[in-house]
Image: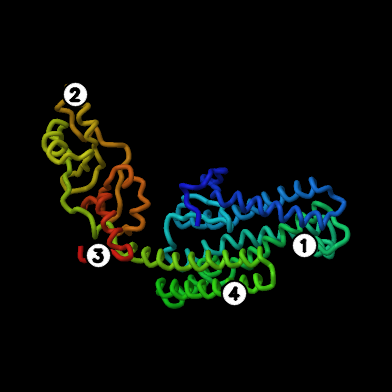
């Protein structure tokens, strides 16, 4: 599966980075070559240059439809607070990298079905456009490349409709990690109330589907179809590996969700009283504890915000030791709830930026401080093979 570090940025849509893995360029080239041959057969009056020009347009539109499919997942996830780190195209299609797994069966179902729903809409639009360009029989002939007379526009629409229809059917197969498998997981999750058990069942279906794909690939090789056989074997390898990885990732996510900020926080971090001067703040907190910032609390322990060491030392350097540190409070007030899951902490921009973040309850009282190191150690304990005795 593609990684963000190896992808080339192509565009940005709705604030989401669209990238391409190097393997995608190979897929694009292969598709143009195969489509060029198809259009030469479907459009005998078209020159070879015209057929391959049409193939370029068709290939680009196909990958645009793949991006639209992934954007369906991304925008549906955004409704539930799930960020999308990016969408990457690669050899076998596209993938939206979501910041976290679903938290409820409803989230899982909506996010999983959103992609196929977009693909189905593209199919419907293709049928509509095809009927505007010709009759139903002519559209069917264009799709099957069996008609004696067709136009470039109808041939293009017919192929795009066909390939998106195949994409929809394939994605709806109830095998993890395909969209249909995630939909099946959401249903099993809703019925059993156990996400882990539902994931195991969906993963088992995914591996079973990979076996069927592999068997069909072997059959094609025995029939002399080397390209088709290798393609299905490659697809089987991907589905099997992705199903296994998805199950492991889901199990880790489940463990991360069971650990909250309040479970790993430091309950006694250094802090600043609301009436402290910058001189006292430097001598009593910043110098002895060597922290880059500290939370300020009122007499009842309520969190007021943070004061940075740099601003305190700027006041001291300017000869103003009696200034109240409260005047230096940062505009933003980074904080997390004690019940926030470890998985969600990993996505915290404040934690990455500051290295730690105050843990504040519903009454506004600061209960502690959770640091990046504590999150890292908790994550390490949740990974497979971790020594829980450490």
Q: How many marks?
A: 4
The residue that mark 4 highlights is 215
Q: Position of residue 109 (x, y in %)?
A: 51, 66
Q: Which comes before the other along the chain, label 2 or label 1?
A: 1
Tags 3 and 2 touching, CB below 8 Å: no
Quickly name the residue at label 1. Answer: 143
Residue 157, given in percent of the width and then of the height, sits at 75, 56
In primary-sequence order, the first of circles 3 and 2 is 2
CA distance for labels 2 and 1: 77 Å
Question: What residue is shown at x 67% (from left), y 49% (from top)?
Answer: 60
Nearest-to-viewer mark from 3 and 2 = 3
Q: Local crowd at mark 3 within 10 Å, few (<14), some, or many (≥20)?
A: few
Residue beneath disc 3: 387
Mark 3 or 4, which is nearer the eye? Answer: 4
Q: Considering only vertical position in the picture, is 285 above or below 125?
A: above
Q: Residue at x 44, y 63 (%)?
A: 102
| Viewer can see residue 129 | no
Q: CA distance from mark 3 to mark 2?
A: 49 Å
- Residue at the image point whose x is 70% and y is 51% from the top: 32
Q: Which mark is residue 317?
A: 2
> Is residue 359 shown to the viewer in this render?
yes
């Amino acid at each position: 599966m593609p990684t963000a570090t190896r992808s080339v940025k192509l565009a940005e849509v709705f604030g989401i980075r669209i990238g391409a893995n190097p393997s995608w360029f190979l897929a694009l080239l292969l598709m143009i070559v195969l489509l060029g041959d198809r259009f030469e057969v479907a459009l005998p009056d078209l020159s070879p240059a015209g057929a391959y020009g049409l193939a370029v347009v068709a290939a680009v539109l196909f990958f645009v439809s793949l991006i639209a499919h992934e954007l369906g997942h991304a925008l549906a996830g955004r409704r539930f607070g799930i960020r999308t780190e990016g969408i990457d195209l690669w050899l076998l299609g596209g993938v939206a990298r979501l910041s976290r797994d679903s938290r409820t069966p409803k989230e899982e179902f909506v996010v999983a079905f959103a992609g196929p729903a977009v693909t189905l809409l593209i199919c419907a639009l293709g049928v509509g456009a095809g009927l505007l360009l010709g009759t139903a029989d002519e559209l069917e002939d264009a799709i099957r490349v069996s008609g004696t007379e067709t136009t470039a526009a109808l041939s293009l629409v017919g192929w795009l409709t066909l390939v998106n229809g195949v994409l929809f059917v394939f994605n709806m197969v109830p095998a993890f990690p395909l969209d249909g498998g995630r939909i099946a997981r959401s249903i099993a999750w809703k019925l059993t109330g156990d996400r882990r058990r539902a994931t195991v069942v969906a993963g088992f279906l995914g591996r079973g589907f990979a076996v069927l794909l592999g068997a069909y690939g072997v059959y094609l090789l025995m029939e002399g179809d080397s390209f088709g056989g290798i393609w299905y074997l490659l697809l089987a390898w991907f589905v099997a590996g992705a199903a296994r990885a998805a199950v492991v990732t889901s199990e880790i996510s489940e463990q991360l969700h069971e650990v909250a900020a309040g479970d790993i926080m430091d309950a006694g971090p250094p802090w600043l009283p609301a009436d402290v001067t910058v001189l006292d703040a430097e001598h009593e907190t910043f110098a002895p504890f060597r922290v880059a910032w500290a939370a300020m609390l009122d007499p009842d322990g309520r969190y007021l915000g943070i004061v940075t060491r740099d601003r305190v030392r700027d006041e001291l350097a300017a000869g103003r030791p009696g200034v109240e540190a409260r005047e230096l409070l940062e505009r933003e007030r980074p904080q997390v709830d004690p019940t926030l899951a470890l998985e969600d902490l990993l996505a915290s921009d404040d934690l990455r930026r500051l290295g730690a973040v105050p843990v504040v309850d519903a009454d506004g009282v600061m209960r502690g401080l959770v640091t990046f190191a504590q999150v890292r150690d908790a994550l390490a304990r949740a990974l497979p093979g971790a020594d829980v005795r450490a």
